[in-house]
Amino acid sequence: MTVSDPRPLTGEPVSLDLLNTRWMQEGVRQDLLADPAGLAIWLAANGLDDRFAADATTLRHTLAARDALNGLVERPGDPAATERLDAVLGHGRIRATLTVDGPGEQPEFRDPAWGPAWTAARDYLDLLRTAPDRIRACAHEACILHFFDTSRNGTRRWCSMAVCGNRAKASRHYARTKDN
């Protein structure tokens, strides 16, 4: 039996999707990674469930990566968060390969329990290389979700226009009508 992913925002790059394992629901913080069952949901959502186990050790390492990533998106360049992310990255490496399709890369881990954490950390480096200014936190004051802005002009403000964007519009409308 497959359990559905309860998070309000999925499908972001794996590093931001890891951050989005915490969200607010009716004013209460939710955490998908409260146990290995939640980790199994997150691994499946990111296509990692066939390579990595959803056990307590993998969960502990994945939470370490989430903590480091959260520190970096909240305070870019923070030395402590940078050190924590570098520590996660130290548990894996990329091995160059030659495949039937040509040159390739294969991640390698001394301990596979570090695989999901390392994968998310490595993805964050790729986002920083691509467009660091497109890594965003939702502009709604009650939202703690993050996204990679893929809009043409780079002006996306909300994790979801249907949810947070509409809440902000409704709030502005209420404030205008209340004053009249």
Image (cartoon, rainbow, N blue to C red):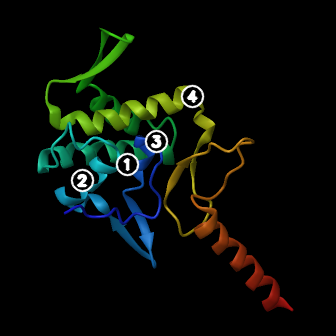
> Residue 39 has which mark?
2
Camera-nearest residue between 74 and 25: 25
The three-letter code of the residue at mark 2 reads Leu
Distance (Cα) linking label 1 and label 3: 9 Å
Disc 2, SS: helix
> In this figure, which residue is indicated by the disc labeled 1?
18
Disc 4, SS: helix
- Tell me which label, 4 or 3, sits earlier in the chain: 3
The three-letter code of the residue at mark 1 reads Leu
> In this figure, which residue is indicated by the disc labeled 4?
130
Camera-nearest residue between 76 and 8: 8
Q: Position of residue 102 (x, y in %)?
A: 39, 8
> In this figure, which residue is indicated by the disc labeled 3?
13
Judge left or right: residue 176 versus residue 74: right
Distance (Cα) linking label 4 and label 1: 19 Å
Camera-nearest residue between 114 and 73: 114
Q: Is residue 109 above or below residue 70?
A: above
* Cβ atoms at labels 4 and 3 below 8 Å apart: no
The three-letter code of the residue at mark 3 reads Pro
- Tell me which label, 1 or 3, sits earlier in the chain: 3
Distance (Cα) linking label 4 and label 3: 12 Å
Residue placed furthest toward the right: 180
- Tell me which label, 4 or 1, sits earlier in the chain: 1
